[in-house]
Amino acid sequence: MTAAPRSSVDVRDAADSPESPKIPNSPKTPKSPLASFLSVERLAFDVGQTPILRDVSFGVERGARVALVGLNGVGKTTALRCVGRLLESWRGEIRLDGVSVRRFSRRDLAKKIAFVRQISGSFSSFTARQLVELSRLPYLRPLEPLSETDRAAVDEALARTGAERFAARTLDSLSGGERQKVLIAAAFAQEPELLLLDEPTTFLDYRSQAEISASISAWAADKNGTVLETTHDLNRAALDADRAVAFAQGTVAFDGPASELTSPSTLAAVFGVSFPTVPHPTTAVPMLVPAAAPAAVSAAVSAARSTSDQSR
Amino acid sequence: MKPAFPLVRVKTPLLFLAALAVATLAVFALSLLGQTTYSPDVWARFPTPDRPLAELDAAAKIFWGERLPKTVLAALAGAALALAGLTMQTLFRNDLATPYTLGIASGASFGATLSIQFSGTLAAVGVPLALFGVPQVVWGAFVGAALAVGLVLALSRRAQTPERVLLAGVATGFFFSSLVLCQQYLANPTKAFAAIRWTTGGLLLCEPGYLATTAAVLAVASFFLYRRSRELDALTLGDERALSLGVDVARLRAALFLLSSALVAVVVAFCGPIGFVGLTVPHVARLCVGVERRRLIPTTLFLGALFLAGCHTFARIVLFPSVLPVGVVTSLLGAPFFLWLLLREPSRAR
C-alpha cells in the first residue's frame, strides 16, 4: 500500500468533486469510489419499517479525517455502525480498499477498524491499562500472553492520549474526560487503519475536547490512519476535520471541505437554519456563534425553510 | 475494583497448582471430620485392586467409601455452581445474576422432578434410564435448566435493564417452583417425600457416575471459559466492544448459555438446588484477584470448591446425628451476604 498524501490540501483535492454538492437528490457516488480507502455506496438501513438511511454514498481517502454531521436521529451513528459491521442488516455496499467489509472475518475486520462509541454510563472495574490491553485481542491466540510488540502498542496508545497518568486506576473511578482518553487509547492500541468515533468529545470540557481532538489528528498523521467521526460540534469539525459529510433525510446533503461546513448556505441545506458566524481569528474559517435572542432563531429557521423550499 | 488482597499477585500457572493442592488437601482433611473424627493415617489405607474397599477396616471403609466421595462431590459441585454464577454474570452483565436468582435452578428442579415422577412412564415408552452413561434425571434437569435460561434470555432481550432481567428471572423461578410444588402435591407420598428431600439441596447420595459426570462437565466448561477469558473480558464491557474487537458475540453467548445450563443441570440433578454459591463465590473471587477472567476463573473454581466442601462438612456435623441439607447452610450464609451486596452497590462492577 502506497502512502496517501497527508496534507489536508491534497486530501481535499483528491476527495472532492469541484461542483457545489448541496443538492440532496443527486446522490451520485464520488468520482471514483473504488479509488477511496473507504467507500460507502448506496447504503440503506431501516429500523423496523422506518428507513433511517435511504441512499448514502461517500468515499474517504486514506489518511483523511472526515466528520459526519446532521440533525439528531439523521443516521450518523447508524452509518458508523454499519461501516464497523456492528449492524449487519444494511443494504448497499461498504468497501475497505475495494473489498466489501462483509467479506472480512470479525477478527480480521477488528485489525482494520476500531470503533469508539459515545460515552455511556455503565463502566466496570477494569483498570485503564487492562481495557487498553484488551484491544490486542484480535492479534492474540487464546491464552497467548501479551508480547513485547503488544505492550509497546499499549504503552504508545496510553501515551498518545496522556492516559498513562491514570492507567492504573479503574474506569469507574475516572472522570468523563479521562475515561474518554482511555477509550481513544484503547482504539489506538488496536492499531486500526480506520478509526470510527461516535461523538468522541461530546459532554467533555473544552480542554479535554481540544486534547482528545489533537491526539486523534496526531495519530492519523503519524500512522497514516483514517478517521470517520460523528459530531454535533460544527466549529470543531470545521477546524479539525479535512472533510465533512452531512446527512439529511437519509441521504448525503453536503460533502465537501470541512471549512465550508459552517457557511450559511450549507447550514440552511443541512440543518434548516442559519446561524450568525464570525471568522476564526487565525484560520478565517467561519465559526458559529449563538443567536442573540430566541426570536432570531425562529426567524432564521423560517427564512431558511423558505429559501430551501424555493431552491427545490 | 482494585484487588482488596493484593498479596495474590503470583503468576497464574503457579496459582493454579497451588490452588489445586490446597483444595485436594482441604477435601481430604474435611473428610476426616464427622461422628468420629479420624486421624490422617486413614489416608494411607486406600483401597486398591488387591485390597478392595469391603476388606478394609471400618474407619478406612467409611472414609474412602462414604465421606471422601461426598466431599469430593461437594467440592466439584461448589466449583461448578460458582463457575455457573460467574458465567451468568458475564452473560447477563449483572452481578446479581446467578442460577438461583434467575430461576435456572428452579427450572432444573422442575425437569429433574418431572423425570423422577414419570420414570415409570418413560421406561414404558422405551426411554433408556441412562443416555451416554448420563442418568435420566440429569437429562431432565438439563432440559429444565435450558428451558429456564432460554426463557430468561428471551425476556431479558425485551427488558434491557439489569433490574428487569432480574425480575424476569425471579418470575421464572417462581413459575417453575410452583410447577415443582404441583408435582409434589399430586404425586404419591413416597415420591413426594423423595422430591422434597431432594429440593432442599443435600449431598445424601453419591452414586459412582456422579463424580465422573460432574468432573467431566466441570472440566469442559472450565477449559472452554478459561481459554476464552480474554473474549469474556471484552463481553463484560459490552456487546459492541466485543464485536469491534473481533469476538463472535452471538456464538460466544450461545456457548455461555449452554455451559451454564449444563453446569447447573448436573449439580441440581445430583445434589438438588444449592443456593447462593453462584452469587457469593464469584464476588469474593473478584475482591481477591480483580475482574480479569484469566485470574477470576481459577479463583472462582477454587473458592467454590472450598466453600461448598466446607458447608457440606459443617452440615454433616453441626446437628449430629441429623444431617442438615447443605442448601440450608449455604443459604443461611449466602442470604445475608446477598443483602449486603444488594444494599452496598446495586448494579455496579462485574
Image: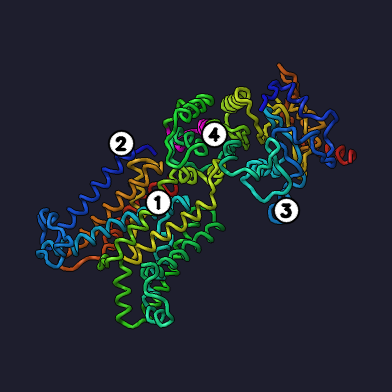
Q: Chain of mark 2?
A: B
Q: Which residues are magenta?
A: A169-185
Q: CA distance from mark 4 to mark 3?
A: 34 Å
**According to the image, label 3 marks what residue?**
A50
Q: Is residue B162 shown to the viewer in this render?
A: yes
Mark 2 in CB contact with mark 3 (< 8 angstroms): no
Q: Chain of mark 1?
A: B
Q: Quadrant of the N terminus of chain A?
A: top right
Question: Which numbered circle lies on residue B86?
Answer: 1
Which amino acid, mark 1? Leu
Q: Secondary structure at mark 2?
A: loop
Badge 4 local density, few (<14 within 10 Å), some, or many (20+)? many
Q: CA distance from mark 2 to mark 3?
A: 55 Å
Point out the frontmost of discs 1 and 3. 1
Question: Which numbered circle lies on residue A190?
Answer: 4
Question: Which of the colour schemes (rainbow, by chain, secondary structure, one colour) is used?
Answer: rainbow
